[in-house]
Amino acid sequence: MPDRWKPNVTVAAIVQRHDRFLLVEEHTRDGLRLNTPAGHLDPAETPLQACVREVLEEAAYDFTPTALVGVYMNRFVRTRTGADITYLRFAFTGDLGQHHAQQRLDEGIVRTVWLTYEELQASAHLHRSPVVLQSIGDYLAGQRFDLNLIQADASIFSPPSAMALPV
């Protein structure tokens, strides 16, 4: 059977405090970019667990997801390598907890910034992903889905058992 195409699965957190949204400024192959705290789904973790981990690693905050804002796909070609990449992003909103000011931010993260929606619109050319603005717009429109929409079977937490071959 030929290899199947699979998108890169990522998670992101949409966090609003007063009239501002939490973003990270990060070094990328295409220069300095803005993104919501986000990252790849790791093996043996659920999208919720990945989102909690990414907010802590990239912004040094505890985070408790309360709703799924949306699931987004985007495709682009890396300017330096020509790689054709598709992402499938689960965007969550939730409650921001304790800030761990002494924690070192993930590699490549320069700092956290709090921007208004208008500032986000004006800086769209610097967004790491085209779905940053779209997902925050959906959040502002009140789009929320129950977290029970996402299910993870216990099998993801351990390697599959070897299948017995017929004798």
Image (tube, grey):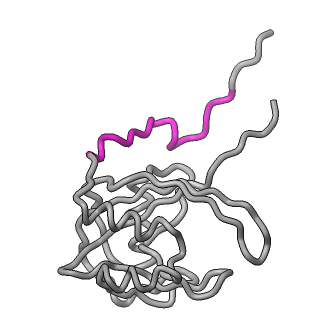
Q: Residue at x 61, y 34 (%)?
A: 160
Q: Quadrant of residue 98?
A: bottom left
Q: Is residue 22 above or below residue 142?
A: below
Q: Nearer the viewer, residue 14 or 79?
A: 79
Q: Residue at x 44, y 49 (%)?
A: 46
Q: Is residue 140 above or below residue 117?
A: above
**Does 150 sit left or right of 31 as displayed?**
left
Q: Residue at x 26, y 82 (%)?
A: 20
Quarter of the picture containing the C terminus is: top right
Quarter of the picture containing the N terminus is: top right
Percent across and percent down for residue 40 are 54, 61
Q: How many numbered discs?
A: 0
Percent across and percent down for residue 85 are 68, 60
Q: Any magenta on residue 73?
A: no
Magenta residues, as a range?
146-162
Q: Nearer the viewer, residue 68 or 64?
A: 68
Q: Quadrant of residue 100?
A: bottom left
**Does 11 sit left or right of 80 as displayed?**
left
Q: Residue at x 26, y 53 (%)?
A: 144
The extreme left residue here reads 18
Q: Nearer the viewer, residue 57 or 73?
A: 73
Percent across and percent down for residue 18 are 18, 80
Q: Any magenta on residue 150?
A: yes
The extreme top residue here reads 167
Percent across and percent down for residue 55 are 39, 71
